[in-house]
């Protein structure tokens, strides 16, 4: 049973609901814990936090307001190219690669199809872009050590039906090499249910889930919510898929620590 959620965005960055609305929805859903993970401030990211201190203050006030009803956690989704300066300021960090840099320009991995096409062109084609993306994920894990690795294969967001590149054996080998770095690091990979919205399956893809299962790697299931009405959107579908791959539990952040919780339907 889902009692906790960590990957959530509000109007303070690129979300559509206020922190207060998210808290109210979490209480209504019967959650014990709610984490906020604003996008780390970055001048090249229009959807990032504009004021890190104000964000932290806002969430801490919400923690006080809901004390005894809902445990509120102050997190950060830090982009690989915009890491936080003081890790101790945050209850947890989600590490993600939303941008790749080329010749001084920042190219969005997941903004829209047009900008993704521009990214591929900037790298001289999908092969080089794919390699750069997964090299960035691996380096992020090695050097920044986030608590959670967000939407591991986000580069496939717009690639339903292999519209932009083939997800062939070469692609899978590159992705698996990076995933092995995640597994060996001890960082917790996220199964991000929002992938269903874009490509009909979560991040990471099935062949990556199989590797995680083979290596007995614990994972956490998150919705990547941007709207208070969607705190659990696609979570049942993602949980069902995990059960099909042999997973029986996932990690949830309960009262400031990981707890293994079963994936059985409520």
Image (cartoon, grey):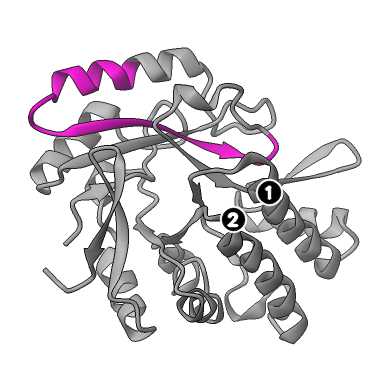
Q: Is residue 79 magenta?
A: yes
Image quadrant where residue 143 sits: top right
* Left or right: 18 in relation to 265: right
Q: Do the residues labelled 2 and 1 touch (CB within 8 Å)?
A: yes
Q: Residue at x 70, y 37 (%)?
A: 81
Image quadrant where residue 66 sits: top left
* Left or right: 227 in relation to 113: left
> Badge 2: how crowded within 10 Å, few (<14), some, or many (20+)?
some
Q: Earlier in the sequence, mark 2 or mark 1?
A: 1
Residue 48 position, x and y percent, is 54, 31
**Between residues 20 and 214, which one lies in front from this camera angle?**
214
Residue 255 position, x and y percent, is 23, 38
Task: Give the residue number, with chain letter if any, for mark 1.
Answer: 142
Q: Residue at x 78, y 54 (%)?
A: 119
Picture layout, residue 235 above or below residue 248: above
What range is drawn magenta here? 58-81
Can residue 131 be seen here? The reply is yes
Q: Which residue is drawn at 65% across and 61% down?
A: 181
**Between residues 255 and 200, which one lies in front from this camera angle?**
255
**What number is the disc on residue 185?**
2
Residue 199 position, x and y percent, is 50, 71
């Amino acid at each position: 049973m889902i009692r906790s959620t960590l990957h959530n965005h509000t109007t303070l960055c690129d979300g559509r609901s206020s922190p207060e609305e998210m808290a109210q929805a979490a209480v209504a859903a019967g959650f014990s814990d709610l984490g906020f993970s604003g996008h780390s401030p970055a001048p090249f990211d229009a959807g990032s936090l504009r004021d890190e201190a104000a964000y932290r203050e806002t969430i801490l006030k919400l923690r006080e307001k809901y004390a005894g009803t809902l445990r509120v956690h102050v997190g950060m989704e830090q982009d690989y190219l915009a890491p936080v300066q003081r890790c101790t300021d945050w209850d947890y960090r989600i590490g993600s690669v939303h941008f790749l840099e080329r010749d001084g320009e920042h190219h969005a991995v997941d903004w829209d199809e047009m900008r993704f096409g521009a990214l591929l062109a900037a790298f001289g084609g999908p092969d080089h872009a794919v390699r750069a993306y997964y090299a960035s994920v691996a380096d992020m894990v090695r050097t920044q050590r986030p608590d959670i690795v967000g939407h591991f294969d986000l580069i496939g967001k717009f690639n339903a039906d292999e519209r932009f590149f083939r997800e062939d054996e070469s692609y899978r080998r590159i992705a698996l090499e990076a995933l092995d770095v995640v597994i060996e690091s001890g960082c917790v990979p996220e199964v991000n249910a929002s992938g269903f919205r874009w490509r009909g399956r979560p991040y990471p893809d099935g062949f990556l889930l199989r590797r995680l299962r083979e290596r007995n790697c614990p994972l956490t299931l998150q919705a990547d919510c941007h709207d208070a009405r969607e705190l659990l959107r696609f979570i049942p579908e993602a949980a069902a898929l995990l059960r099909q791959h042999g997973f029986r539990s996932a990690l949830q952040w309960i009262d400031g620590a990981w707890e293994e919780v079963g994936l059985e339907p409520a």
